[in-house]
Image: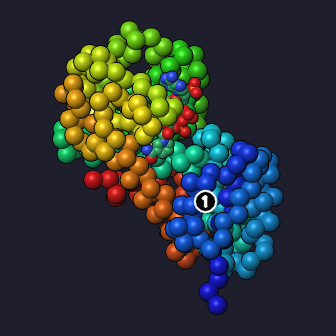
Amino acid sequence: MARKHILHMITPLKHMSPFDVNMALDAGFDAVVPYVGVGLDEVTGLVQDAIFSRPPDAGADTGIFIAGKDVSLALDMFDAAKKSMVPPFQVSVFADPAGSFTTAAAMVAKVEKALAKKFERTLKDTRITIFGATGVVGFCTAVIAAKEGAKVTIVGHDGAERVKKVAAEMKRRFGVEVAAEDGSSEAKKTALAETAEVILTAAKAGVQVISQAHLKAAGKLLIAADVNAVPPAGVEGLGVHANGDPIDGSGAVGIGPLAIGNVKYKVESGLFKRMIEADKTVAYDFQDAFSLAREFAK
Ligand SMILES: NC(=O)c1ccc[n+]([C@@H]2O[C@H](COP(=O)([O-])OP(=O)(O)OC[C@H]3O[C@@H](n4cnc5c(N)ncnc54)[C@H](OP(=O)(O)O)[C@@H]3O)[C@@H](O)[C@H]2O)c1
């Protein structure tokens, strides 16, 4: 009898994401089991409980998924899970807190593709300004873009203080240099828009961050991309299905949340499927998500 594919889904939060539960089952796992309110210090115990219950050759049929809403904590849990293996007893691990790794990967891959197709440019040295970078999606987007050599600025909607701390954490953990700026007034957002070649909005659902007035001031803007699918759009005039289409009232092109979501969906589902199909154990984080997103982005 074929061995069952089991996914243990760990979150520090009160609930496991129903989105991720559905995605995992639809990708083909036979059983998914949520563990909620899990502390970092509990990861080793849970992983070792899982690895020793099945013979070593079943390791690749057993997975750990790490959720939550904090990139650094999820990566700490990911590292703790990987360090908990006792070869030959080991299992696969995939981290995607609040869908942020796969969503950020999809957004950056779509922007990269549009830069190449429309402007014959790469991410390297492109000035990318990110709104909502204290959130998980914005944080991860900034790290992926900066690792590709983009000149990234993260913007705080309530001043520069918190984004400066976020930039310091990005430098400490990932070795990337990211600028941090205050976007707490219309005038400050306008000044930031004036220098941006790419604007990425990853703000709270239903919040408009960039208005037509900001777009008019954005004379160097090539691309604006938005992940918020809940009206109003994060960028005024940017359609949810936009896929490199001109943005009303701007010379730039737009990439909307459903165009990004389409790639995000394929990447998350694709990584779950790869876990299921792998002959040997695998470990996937945002870099693996970005590699796969590049294959899907059109
Ligand atoms: N298209 C897709 O496939 C997809 C997938 C997943 C998520 N999403 C969307 O991606 C977005 C980001 O998700 P997330 O989980 O990172 O969200 P989040 O944790 O709610 O954070 C969003 C960011 O928005 C900021 N923010 C809050 N109010 C704001 C305001 N009035 N003006 C400007 N910024 C504001 C937050 O700042 P604070 O730190 O002050 O809270 C934070 O930096 C959401 O819109 C979500 O729905 C899309």
Q: How is the image coloured?
A: rainbow
Please rate how many residues cluster around mark 1, counting C-alpha atoms within 10 Å: few if below 14, some from 14 to 19, many from 20. Answer: some
- Work out which residue is located at the far top of the displayed protein and give it: 187
Q: Nearer the viewer, residue 86 or 241?
A: 241
Residue 212 in sight in this render: yes
Q: Nearer the viewer, residue 18 or 74?
A: 18
**Against 93, is 67 above or below?**
above
Q: Which secondary structure lies at badge 1?
A: helix
Residue 133 in sight in this render: no
**Against 21, is 53 above or below?**
below
How many callouts does the rendering have? 1
**Against 89, is 256 above or below?**
above
Q: What quarter of the picture does the N terminus occupy?
A: bottom right
What amino acid is labelled 1 in the image?
Val
Location of residue 93 (image quadrant): bottom right
Cβ at disc 1 under 8 Å from ligand 1: no
**Image x and y of residue 113, in percent:** 27, 47
* Residue at 52%, 68% in the rendered image: 27
Q: Is residue 160 left or right of residue 147?
A: right
* Residue at 42%, 59% in the rendered image: 266
**Against 14, is 25 above or below?**
below
- Work out which residue is located at the far bottom of the displayed protein and give it: 1
**Image x and y of residue 199, in percent:** 35, 29
* Residue at 34%, 36% in the rendered image: 225
Q: Nearer the viewer, residue 77 or 86?
A: 77
**Residue at the disc numbered 1:** 21
**Image x and y of residue 24, in percent:** 57, 63
Q: Nearer the viewer, residue 279 or 37?
A: 37
* Residue at 44%, 56% in the rendered image: 265
Location of residue 108 (image quadrant): top left
**Image x and y of residue 26, in percent:** 53, 67
